[in-house]
Amino acid sequence: MARRADVHGRGDMSDMARRDWDDAFSNMAHVDGSEKLPAFWADRAARYRASGVRLDEDIRYGDADRELMDIVWPDEAPKGLAVFVHGGFWIRMDKSHWTDLAEGARANGWAIAFPQYTLAPEMHISQMTRQVAAAIALAADKVDGPIRLAGHSAGGHLVTRMVCADSPLPAPVLNRILHVLSLSGLHDLRPLMWTAMNELLKLDEAEACAESVALQRPNDRANVTAWVGGGELPEFIRQTKLLAIMWDGLDADIREVIEGKHNHFTVLDSLKEANSPLTRAFIGELG
């Protein structure tokens, strides 16, 4: 049984959550062989970087150690900028695990930026939101044209925060964002206060509400696809449905996609395919 956290994020053994929230978010515990996946992802991405693709690595967008991003370039002048923000519950992973996911968008003529950000407990989620905004703003200076954003899991939260009414992006950059893809995104952060992860995240009620995109207003130009695998944990499907329901009620341009039987990890794979529905959603061309 998960411990319920008080409004300051501290565990309170006298007040027990009704649901095991640790299990509700534990993707790796529910996917066979998942303990091997981080090494597999890192190796696959490293092989892609060594394949001859045009790549600028470790572009610094701030002074913190992890304020770095990579950009994968297409063969010709880019049609615009696509940004992929990694997940890992804001406590793990980095840009180097995901480079090969650029291939679908790259093959369609887009430059793809992969920012990373400072992890908890060194920073709060609200600070990570501002870091990602800074990375996108710098990438936008380097690549002309329209901007598409995508993020997975915690990254889905971070990219969707960019198109909330209180977006930390400068207006000229925000106005270039034509589509956001939240892939298995976390849109309601309040249940995370009841997990063991909150010892690192240190979410309190105020930050959990302020950072929950499902509780925020979209900006007037927000165009969002919330996408999740049909074989994912129920909580991730709920998180996707919740954003679609809440923002539809605020008259946002939003759609929900539940794809097949994909789990939290296999749902990413078709980003490597130039003509997959997921890649089309990333670059804003899904019908």
Image: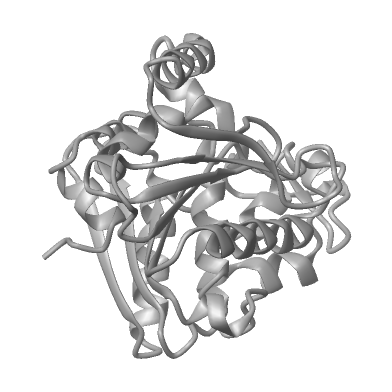
- Vertical order, 124 against 115 (above or below): below
Residue at horizontal 54 percent and vertical 39 percent from the top? 25
* Of the pair 287 and 193, the residue shown nearer to us: 287
Residue at horizontal 65 percent and vertical 64 percent from the top? 133
Residue 77 point in image, percent of width and height: 33, 52
Q: Quadrant for residue 283, please give it.
A: bottom left
Residue 179 point in image, percent of width and height: 35, 68
Q: Is residue 280 left or right of residue 226?
A: left
* Of the pair 101 and 156, the residue shown nearer to us: 101
Residue at horizontal 68 percent and vertical 71 percent from the top? 209
Question: Taking the image as drawn, is residue 251 in sight?
Answer: yes
Q: Is residue 180 left or right of residue 137?
A: left
- Vertical order, 70 against 164 (above or below): above
Location of the C terminus by quadrant is bottom left
Q: Quadrant for residue 87, please give it.
A: top right
Residue 125 point in image, percent of width and height: 73, 56
Q: Is residue 157 left or right of residue 128?
A: left
Location of the N terminus by quadrant is top right
Q: Quadrant for residue 211, please give it.
A: bottom right
Q: Is residue 108 left or right of residue 39?
A: left
Q: How many marks?
A: 0
* Of the pair 104 and 33, the residue shown nearer to us: 104
Color encoding of the figure: one colour
Residue at horizontal 26 percent and vertical 49 percent from the top? 109
Question: Taking the image as drawn, is residue 164 in sight?
Answer: no
- Vertical order, 268 against 30 (above or below): below
